[in-house]
Each structure stands twice: as structure tokens, then as C-alpha cells.
Image (cartoon, coloured by chain):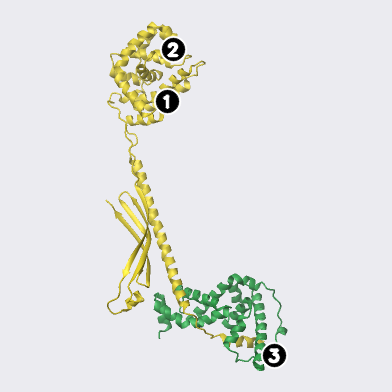
């Protein structure tokens, strides 16, 4: 088993074997990210392919000061965002309601046993704008400022989109729990 | 707040490490995309290189062509100058014939001049009415020279040549020249009766012309006969007032000497040297530069592997038990100028089943 550094050196030398190893090592996790950002599997595959071409083409620009996996994730997320960029404007044009905390469901403790596939299904049911902002903020850990810069929107838009996404997801989780309890 | 965190935490925990295996086609797509990108980069470089080479070849060719044009002698001798002028005024054949006739008929013209002089003396009234109808073509040629000599009496070029040729017959020629000059001049400038009715004046004129010293600018005139003759002819044309009543034939006959005078004036300094007037043949040069655009398809055969399979062979082909024919194809652009041929282009070659290569080719051949 090759280490990351060996793989990286091989990829820097345009070695196809090293590239193949790198792809095999990170393809599944990166594909998971793509699936979170894309509604359809085919779109996720396109994003993954484009992301890996970018990775191999720009691998010289990687600096060893940070995590290599983090660098890969960032490229995949950016590729996914670029994929949706043409539609992003329309996504965020929706009227922004001031979401109050009162709109949130009453105090609930969420069952941690919800499967990843179900959670993924819930996220994919969100509109593009909500999904992207929720993914970036809640899962990837970007700040609203970063999200605003990356998506070319205001911070307030990012915040409102996140609030809406949370409300919708909470409702979906409750529905799921009711179904789970009833069954 | 805790609810928000709860839902964020729920999704983060559940999806942070979410993995799913993508289909195998994605890796093939990645390989293809990388190859295309590589080709685009190298192709762009090759395209730029091809453009640079072609542009350089063209520039070299143009410079060489210009250099050849500048180094070619344009008109070194007066004969050639006269040829170029003849093409502008009259055609070459007429001009050369005229000059030959001048040379051949120099003596004849003098003899003819005697008879013509007699005719003029005998029939001054006829000459008065239509003086040009009396003069024969030979004399007309001579008249052209004489006209330039006397019209532009300042140059005295024809006098010098006439002196050289026929110093003994000069007085007679002068007489004819003066007569022709008078005919060439507009009616308003000098009355015809002065010429034809007063032979004494003619003799006086001859004496005057003999005595007239050659002007100081004669050497200049000899050096630049063409310019002076042109200037004089043009000057006369400007100075000459339009006669009030002129016959169409007169106008034509007056215009003819002006164009012919230029030719004769250009020839005057070298009249003695001209033995045969030759007309340079213009041989069309073959085009120096040739272009070719070549397309070709070339088959290549890869046989079965007889020995064991090495890693290189595995990389080279998928199935070593199978013999295959591959096609190499390409396009080349060939520029040939003078003895140098530059051939450049791209060839798509396939080495084995796996390896394809786009090859750039540039060959410079010295054909000499």
C-alpha cells in the first residue's frame, strides 16, 4: 500500500499507476460529497470526473502544508458549485423570509439511528440553494462569509437559505420519526 | 439554538463520511479527459510552432524576392532607357525602326534633302500651302532630329552628332533643319514666307548657327540629354501658343515629333556607338515558391508476440495473441522556394492498441 506522499510523487511525475491508485483511494469519499451536492447520480458522476481531471492537472499547485484530503474535498466542492453556478442565481432569487426560531418545530430530540441513505434522501429533496448552503455550512464547516464569497451571494442570503433548509429538514426528520415509530 | 445544532450535528455525523463507489466508467472518462487536455496543450504549442515556422519561411522568401528585385539592373544604358521610353510613348518596333532608319538614311536623307530643297525652291507656293506634304518620310525622321536641335537650339545635341557624322554635309542639313523647324513652329510664331521666300535668310542662319558657340551647359546637356530633351519638349509644348486655325493633320503631325523627339534625344549622345539596336527579350521567370498541402493515410502492421509478455508489451497492446493493422494518418504543409523545401505537419500514429501519439514533423531539405 502506497502512502499519500508516494502517490503524490507519482502523480507529480504523471505516472498513470499512481493516478489510478489515488483515484481508487479517494473516489468513493469524493463521490459521496458529489452526491450531497447533486440531485442526480449522473450529475454527481460528471462532477466527480471533472474534479479528478482538475486534481491531476493541478496537482503541482498542492502545497504540503495542509491535508491532502482537505485539498481534494475543496476541489470537488468547487467543481460541484461551478456545475450549478449557472442555476445558482435563480436558486437564490426566491424571496427571503425572515425565518424566526418560532417557525422551528418544538423541542425535539432527533434519533441518531437515521441511515445515511435516508439523510441523503432528505438533503436531495431540498431546493438547490438550500441544499448547497446547508451542505457547505452544516457539513463542510464553511462560514457564511465564505459561502457568500463562493456563491457570490450576500451573507444574509446565505443565512436565510440555511434557516429555511433547517426548517425543512427538521420537518422531514419528524415525519421520518413518526413513520419509524408507527411502523 | 440547541435544535439547530442538533439537526446540523445529525446530518454532519450521518453524512460526513458518506461514501459510495462510483462506476468504473468515470476513471476511463478521467483518463480521456487528461489525454485531451495534454493534446490540447501540446497541440496549441505545435500549432504556434507551425505558424511561426511558416511565417518565418514566408518572411525569408519575401526578403529574398525583394532583394532580387532591387539588385536587378533596371536601365543601365541609354539604349535600355530609350526602350522604356518607347514603351511609354510608342511601341518598341516603331522606335527601333525609326532609329535604324535614322542611321541608315543619314546619307540618303542628305541627298533627298537636296532634291527636296530644289522642290521647295521651285514650288514655294505649294510649300506655303502645305509644306509638310512635300517632305518625304525619311526627311520626316530627320526632321524630328532637326526639330529637337533647332527647337531646343540651346542644347545643340543634334548638331554635334551631325557634325560627327557628316561634317561636310552640315550646311545642307542645317538648311533642312531650319526649314523643318519653321514648319514645326506654329504659324503665328514665324511666317512661312520668311523661310520659303527668302533663301538669303537661310544662308545667314546657317552662318549664325555655325558661329554660335556651344553653350556652357553643353556638357550638362550631354550628360542628361533625356532630361533636357524632355524639359525642352515640354517647355515648347507649354510655350507654343495654339494656332487659331489648324487642320487636324497638322495637329497630328505636330504631336508626333514631340513623342519621337524624346527617343531621338535620348539616343543622341550615343548615336555614333549604336550599330545594331536590339530589343531585349522578356523571359517570364518561373515562380520561385510552391505550396503543397499533403494528406495521407499509412497502414502499420503489428504482428503476434512470439516471446513472453513483458510489462512493456502489456502496455503496448491489450491482446498479444492478435495481429492487427493500424492506420497512421496526418497532414503536412510543404513550402518550397528556390532550393529549400520546408515540410511541416502533424501525424497521428498508433503504436500498438493502447498507445497513440500525435507527432509533429518538420523537415528542411536543401534540394540543390
Which chain letter matches label 1?
A: B
Question: Residue B184: percent from the left, percent from the top?
Answer: 42, 17
- Disc 2 to disc 3, C-alpha distance: 135 Å
Q: Quadrant of residue B329?
A: bottom left
Distance of label 3 from label 1 (alpha carbons): 115 Å
Q: In this orientation, does residue B341 appear? A: yes
**Circles 1 and 2 in contact, beta carbons < 8 Å:** no
Drawing shade for chain B: yellow
Q: What is the chain letter for disc 2?
A: B
Residue name at image x 42 percent, y 22 percent:
B256
The secondary element bearing badge 1 is classed as helix
Q: Chain of mark 3?
A: A
Q: Would you name the residue on which mark 3 appears?
A: A107
Number of the label disc, if any, that sits on residue B231: 1
Q: How packed is label 3: few (under 14 Cα within 10 Å), some, or many (20 or more)?
A: few
Residue A25 x/y as whole percent: 46, 83
- Dots 3 and 1: beta carbons under 8 Å? no
User: Which chain shows up in green?
Assistant: A
The quarter in which the C terminus of chain A is drawn is bottom right
Judge whether B59 appears above or below A45 on screen: above
Please tell me which residue is depicted at 46% across the width and 18% down the height of the picture.
B249
Circle 3 — which element? loop
* Quadrant in the picture for the N terminus of chain A: bottom left
Ranked by sequence position, the earlier of labels 1 and 2 is 2
- Residue position marked by numbered label 2 in the rendering: B130
* Residue A86 vertical placement versus B164 (above, below): below
**Where residue B297 sits in the image (x, y, percent)?**
36, 62
Residue B118 appears in which quarter of the rendering? top left
Residue lying at the far right in this picture: please name it. A102
**Camera sees residue A9:** no
Q: Secondary structure at mark 2?
A: loop
Amino acid at each position: 500500500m502506497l502512502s499519500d506522499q508516494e502517490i503524490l510523487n507519482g502523480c507529480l511525475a504523471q505516472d498513470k499507476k499512481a493516478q489510478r491508485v489515488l483515484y481508487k483511494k479517494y473516489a468513493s469519499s469524493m463521490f459521496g460529497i458529489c452526491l450531497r451536492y447533486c440531485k442526480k447520480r449522473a450529475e454527481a458522476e460528471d462532477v466527480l470526473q471533472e474534479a479528478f481531471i482538475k486534481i491531476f492537472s493541478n496537482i503541482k499547485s498542492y502545497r504540503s502544508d495542509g491535508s491532502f484530503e482537505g485539498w481534494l474535498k475543496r476541489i470537488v466542492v468547487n467543481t460541484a458549485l461551478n456545475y450549478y453556478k449557472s442555476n445558482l442565481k435563480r436558486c437564490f432569487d426566491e424571496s427571503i423570509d425572515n425565518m424566526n426560531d418560532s417557525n422551528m418545530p418544538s423541542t425535539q430530540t432527533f434519533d441518531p439511528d437515521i441511515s445515511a441513505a435516508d439523510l441523503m434522501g432528505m438533503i436531495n429533496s431540498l431546493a438547490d440553494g438550500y441544499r448547497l448552503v446547508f451542505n457547505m455550512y452544516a457539513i463542510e464547516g464553511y462560514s457564511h462569509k465564505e459561502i457568500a464569497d463562493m456563491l457570490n451571494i450576500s451573507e444574509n442570503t446565505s443565512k436565510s437559505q440555511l434557516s429555511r433548509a433547517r426548517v425543512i429538514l427538521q420537518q422531514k426528520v419528524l415525519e421520518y420519526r413518526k413513520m419509524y415509530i408507527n411502523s | 439554538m440547541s435544535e439547530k445544532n442538533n439537526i446540523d450535528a445529525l446530518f454532519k455525523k450521518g453524512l460526513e463520511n458518506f461514501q459510495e463507489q462510483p462506476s468504473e466508467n468515470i476513471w476511463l472518462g478521467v483518463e480521456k479527459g487528461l489525454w485531451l487536455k495534454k493534446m490540447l496543450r501540446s497541440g496549441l504549442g505545435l500549432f504556434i510552432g507551425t505558424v511561426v515556422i511558416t511565417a518565418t519561411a514566408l518572411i525569408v522568401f519575401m526578403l529574398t524576392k525583394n532583394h532580387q528585385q532591387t539588385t536587378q539592373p533596371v536601365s543601365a544604358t541609354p539604349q535600355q532607357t530609350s526602350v522604356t521610353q518607347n514603351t511609354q510613348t510608342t511601341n518598341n518596333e516603331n522606335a527601333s525602326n525609326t532609329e535604324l532608319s535614322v542611321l541608315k538614311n543619314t546619307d540618303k536623307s542628305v541627298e533627298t534633302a537636296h532634291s527636296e530643297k530644289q522642290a521647295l525652291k521651285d514650288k514655294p507656293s505649294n510649300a506655303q500651302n502645305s509644306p509638310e506634304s512635300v517632305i518625304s518620310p525619311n526627311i520626316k525622321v530627320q526632321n524630328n532630329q532637326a526639330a529637337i536641335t533647332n527647337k531646343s537650339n540651346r542644347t545643340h545635341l543634334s548638331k554635334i552628332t551631325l557634325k560627327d557624322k557628316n561634317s561636310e554635309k552640315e550646311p545642307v542639313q542645317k538648311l533642312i533643319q531650319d526649314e523643318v523647324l519653321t514648319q514645326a513652329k506654329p504659324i503665328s510664331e514665324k511666317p512661312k514666307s520668311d523661310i520659303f521666300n527668302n533663301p538669303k535668310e537661310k544662308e545667314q542662319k546657317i552662318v549664325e548657327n555655325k558661329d554660335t558657340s556651344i553653350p556652357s551647359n553643353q556638357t550638362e546637356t550631354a550628360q542628361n540629354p533625356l532630361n533636357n530633351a524632355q524639359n525642352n519638349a515640354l517647355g515648347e509644348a507649354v510655350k507654343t501658343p495654339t494656332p487659331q486655325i489648324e487642320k487636324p493633320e497638322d495637329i497630328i503631325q505636330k504631336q508626333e515629333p514631340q513623342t519621337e523627339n524624346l527617343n531621338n534625344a535620348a539616343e543622341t549622345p550615343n548615336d555614333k556607338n549604336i550599330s545594331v539596336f536590339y530589343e531585349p527579350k522578356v523571359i517570364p521567370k518561373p515562380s520561385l515558391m510552391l505550396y503543397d498541402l499533403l494528406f495521407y493515410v499509412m497502414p502499420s502492421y503489428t504482428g503476434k508476440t512470439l516471446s513472453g509478455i513483458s510489462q512493456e508489451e502489456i502496455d503496448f497492446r491489450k491482446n498479444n495473441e492478435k495481429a492487427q493493422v493500424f492506420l497512421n494518418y496526418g497532414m503536412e504543409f510543404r513550402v518550397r522556394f528556390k532550393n529549400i523545401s520546408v515540410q511541416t505537419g502533424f501525424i497521428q500514429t498508433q503504436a500498438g492498441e493502447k498507445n497513440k501519439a500525435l507527432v509533429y514533423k518538420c523537415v528542411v531539405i536543401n534540394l540543390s
